[in-house]
Amino acid sequence: MNVRLQELLQQFESRGGEKIQHVLIGSPEGIEEVRHTLHALRYVEVGLWSPIVPMPGTSSSMSVLTRYRTAN
């Protein structure tokens, strides 16, 4: 992995600073695919995402990931 990319990703591993939330909306299969892709890129473990839940009144589902950005 690119060293600079690894440094940027490490900024989100500590529990301090600004809270950042990633939201995936789509089919459960699509959400699962993106979660596994982000894991393969070493961005986040699959188990850190919220469960995939249906969104009321739509045919879509949702999953959320919360990370924390450290101040530079």
Image (cartoon, rainbow, N blue to C red):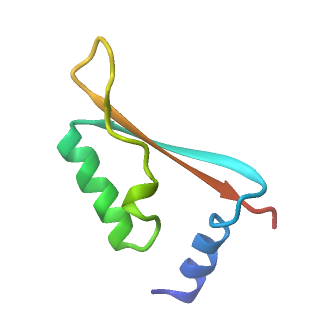
Estimate the x, y position of residue 27 in percent, counting from the top left: 21, 36
Q: Compared to 15, does 32 lie above or below?
A: above
In the image shown, does 2 or 41 lie closer to the viewer? 41
Estimate the x, y position of residue 47 in percent, counting from the top left: 40, 57
Estimate the x, y position of residue 16 in percent, counting from the top left: 77, 57
Q: Residue at x 26, y 27 (%)?
A: 60
Q: Residue furthest left?
A: 29
Q: Residue at x 46, y 55 (%)?
A: 48
Q: Compared to 8, does 63 lie above or below?
A: above
**Image quadrant in which the N terminus is located:** bottom left
Q: Residue at x 69, y 65 (%)?
A: 14
- Which of the 4 quarters of the picture holds residue 6? bottom right
Q: Residue at x 30, y 54 (%)?
A: 34
- Which of the 4 quarters of the picture holds residue 23? top left
Q: Compared to 52, does 45 lie above or below?
A: below
Q: Residue furthest right?
A: 72
Left or right: 43 in relation to 51: right
In the image shown, does 5 or 52 lie closer to the viewer? 52
Left or right: 69 in relation to 43: right
Number of numbered tags placed on the structure image: 0
In the image shown, does 4 or 43 lie closer to the viewer? 43
**Image quadrant in which the C terminus is located:** bottom right
